[in-house]
Image: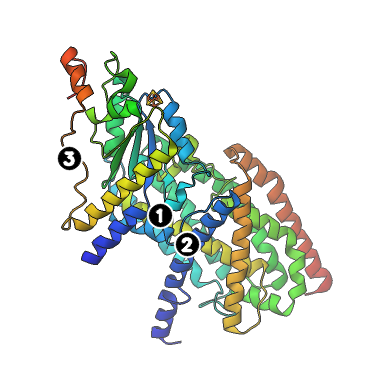
Amino acid sequence: MSVLTALLKILIFPGFLFLSAYALALQFLDRKLYARLQSRQGPPWYQPVADFIKLIGKETLIPAQANQLMFRMLPAFCLAAMAVAFVYIPVWGRGAMFSFEGDMIVVLYFLAVPPLASFLAGWYSRSLFATVGATRTLTQMFAYEVPMFLALLAPTLLSGSWSVSGNMAFYATHPLLVLVNLPALVVTLIVSQCKLERTPFDAPEAETEIVSGPLVEYGGRYLAFFTFSKDCELVVVLSLFTAMFLPFSTGISGVDFLLYLVKTLAVMAVLCLLRATTARLRINQIVAFCWKYLAPTALLQIILNLVLREVFLI
Amino acid sequence: MDLIKKAIAWGSRKSPWVIHFNAGACNGCDIEVVDALTPRFDLERAGVIKQGSPRHADVLIVTGAVTLQVRDRLVQIYEQMPSPKFVIAVGACACSGGIFNGCYCVSGGVNTVIPVDAYVPGCAVRPETLIAAVTKLLDKVEAQTAAADGQLPPGPEAEPTPAPAAAAITDQDGGERHGK
Ligand code: SF4
């Protein structure tokens, strides 16, 4: 692959430009579906774009006591991490744009950047509400990281490949084995909600208690890029989820792309349903829930997969 | 340049994020403000989202005659908002002091403390009136933003126009009162 095509792929399709467009579209669909579930009309289709443009046009205020450099850089870090993680996830066809053995670990590490960035954003804002939100973000991260890693590891134990594309290729030849991973699928679904800090796991943002969490001091274009990178995080998590647990593909690139859209939208709908039908948990309840129920289930799944692999020598 | 300005004007028109501040209302108007934000009226159709942080908000909705206790906080919250920012005074109290006008502990209408862009009369206001006020204000905002030459919308005048009622209070016994 020449440098030019590689650049085109990374920057335009299926890379950054597609990621941005899809992130804004998903934000709209999420809000629209949420509104419909509450029997209202919901925002018009251009709402995410209007919000973004408006925030860009606003005055930039940085609190005097905040760390100026970190305050400005964190949204960029967050967005860049998401753009890089997206490179290793299959969108167009069965394989990702780039892949190597172990790229799943890289994606998981990049996925840890948004919560860390929002923790640092809250910490360096030096505001009371932001600090409370920041500590909650970090506490929540300790709650969901372990079940998430365990659950995402399960399918790779069967496929024997720690690459998202390799995993996809394996399950394309053994589609029935997907059923074995059902418990891990459920765990990851709940953990995704937790990772994305959506209700019922939105204790870090909890606008009725701590205003709006770590981003309380952010405004203008920095807020625009922070919220935008959170939307990108949603796309990356959904794409990773579908690639690991719903790895059905035909091998024809265009059809696979459509399949990808259908799968991510379906998972999105489930997450939105979860958001619309639950109320916020306290942070200690979140931690207890993740460690008491999700982590053991994921661990059982790992044992099951190890046994299966030994018995059937997959 | 022109296109960018138009785009930003369009964006501000289509996505007003509001923050609600009770500056000493009897809670009647606050109930109605919250009512206007419920699914029944579905203000998200117009892009309205209620924000908790003044840094995220564009429109400050103030209810109640501003009490002396809360006056400085109101100014602080107003100053924390990034411009372009707009203030809507909701209810008779916020417009002029209402039934609390002349009370020893209030400073009068909201315009005695911060510049106000729209007044919504009523005791308490109806949600429909509030929605009409928001849309009227936004139309004005869009026209202003698109017309201004490379400047942020002029928005409110620097010097708040004194409400007649507020002026009257100062006459009675100035000093502690802050009516202009
Ligand atoms: S205008 Fe009427 S309802 Fe509103 S705060 Fe004043 S007294 Fe209460």
Up/down of A230 relative to A308, above or below: above
Q: Residue furthest bottom?
A: A2
Q: Disc 3 marks which residue?
A: B157
Q: What whole-number distance in Å separates the C-alpha atoms at marks 1 and 2?
A: 10 Å
Label 1 resides on the chain identified as A
Residue A192 appears in the figure: yes
Mark 1 is surrounded, within 10 Å at the Cα level, by few (under 14), some (14 to 19) or many (20 or more) other residues, namely many
Label 2 resides on the chain identified as A
Residue type (three-letter) at the residue carrying disc 2: Cys
Does the residue at mark 1 contact the one at mark 3 (Cβ under 8 Å)?
A: no
Name the residue rendered at 44%, 79% in the picture: A9
Up/down of B73 relative to B79, above or below: above
Q: Disc 1 marks which residue?
A: A226
Q: What whole-number distance in Å separates the C-alpha atoms at marks 1 and 3?
A: 33 Å
Name the residue rendered at 59%, 37% in the picture: A282
Q: Indicate which disc, 1 or 2, sits on the residue closer to the N terminus.
A: 1
Q: Disc 2 marks which residue?
A: A232
- Nearest the viewer among B96 and A49 is B96
Quarter for ligand 1? top left
Residue type (three-letter) at the residue carrying disc 1: Phe
